[in-house]
Image: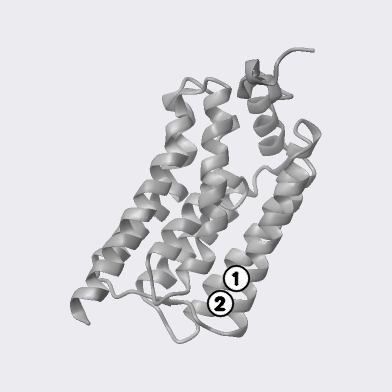
């Protein structure tokens, strides 16, 4: 039997890079043209963040809850689990995120966004904008066709990055409950892409660092005003 220390992360992968991106191609083909609806939904979330009303926190939380449940079912359970047995267990974490959003944002109404003048809001909003508009186009930067684009609300990476952006733009302490699962997914996704030797592996890691910087700035500003 080979020594356990001789194994590397790629020895545990059950799929190749080609199979991984083929998964997104088939997924996008199956759901076309619903991608446009998810992009419009993301634009609505941004509008509610920028011009909040008394019901905005609940509406954003409810929308995000639905998106996390959708990705758990449509992508992780029905698609990703066919090439990666661990995806089924990850789906439970996505469901847990939906439950947190429902409890804290819908029932307890604790989601409140920072004012537009706050640096933390702009850092969070810019990260969300990246997830919504720029992330699907990064596929072109790495010589992959647009058919394999990862769309916000439909696939895990832009949903996790976008959720980190939204939580970073929140005021109060609710973000510490809503950020860990999206942050953990960014770590796992970056590791998976790095193991596949994909040049885009740094993107989810950088997004997590961006969100952490926003949280730190917000906490520093709060301490200074206290």
Question: Do labels 2 and 1 touch, CB within 8 Å?
Answer: yes
Q: CA distance from mark 2 to mark 1?
A: 5 Å
Q: Residue 21, how many percent across, how many down? A: 63, 27
Q: Is residue 22 left or right of residue 112?
A: right
Visible in this render: residue 150? no
The quadrant of the image that shows the N terminus is top right
Q: State the SS at label 2.
A: helix
Q: Position of residue 88 (x, y in %)?
A: 78, 45
Label 1 sits on a secondary structure element that is helix
Q: Which residue is mark 2?
A: 105
The 10 Å Cα crowd at callout 1, few under 14, some 14 to 19, many 20 or more, is many
- Provide the residue designation for mark 1: 101
The residue carrying pointer 2 sits among few (fewer than 14), some (14 to 19) or many (20 or more) residues within 10 Å by Cα, namely many
Identify the residue shown where x is 63% and y is 66%: 65
Lateral position of residue 18 relative to residue 195, left or right:
right
Quadrant assignment for the C terminus: bottom left
Q: Nearer the viewer, residue 86 or 28?
A: 86
What kind of colouring is applied to the model shown? one colour
Residue at (55, 35) in percent of width and height:
149
Where residue 23 sits in the image (x, y, percent)? 70, 31
User: Which label is found at residue 221?
Assistant: none
């Amino acid at each position: 039997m080979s020594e356990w220390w001789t194994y590397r992360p790629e020895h545990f992968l059950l799929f190749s890079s080609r199979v991984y991106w083929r998964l997104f191609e088939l997924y996008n083909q199956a759901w076309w043209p619903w991608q446009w609806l998810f992009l419009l939904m993301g634009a609505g979330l941004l509008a509610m963040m920028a011009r909040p009303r008394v019901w905005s926190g609940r509406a954003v939380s409810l929308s995000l809850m639905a998106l996390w449940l959708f990705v758990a079912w449509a992508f992780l359970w029905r698609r990703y689990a066919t090439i990666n047995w661990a995806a089924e267990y990850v789906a439970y974490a996505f469901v847990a995120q939906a439950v947190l959003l429902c409890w804290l944002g819908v029932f307890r109404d604790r989601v409140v966004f920072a004012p537009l003048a706050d640096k933390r809001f702009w850092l969070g909003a810019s990260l969300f904008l990246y997830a919504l508009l720029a992330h699907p186009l990064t596929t072109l930067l790495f010589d992959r066709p647009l058919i394999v684009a990862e769309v916000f609300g439909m696939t895990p990476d832009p949903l996790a990055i976008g959720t980190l952006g939204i939580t970073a733009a929140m005021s109060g302490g609710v973000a510490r409950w809503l950020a860990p699962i999206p942050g953990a997914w960014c770590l796992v996704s970056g590791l998976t892409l790095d193991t596949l030797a994909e040049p885009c592996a740094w993107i989810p890691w950088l997004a997590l660092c961006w969100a952490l910087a926003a949280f730190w700035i917000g906490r520093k500003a709060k301490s200074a005003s206290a």
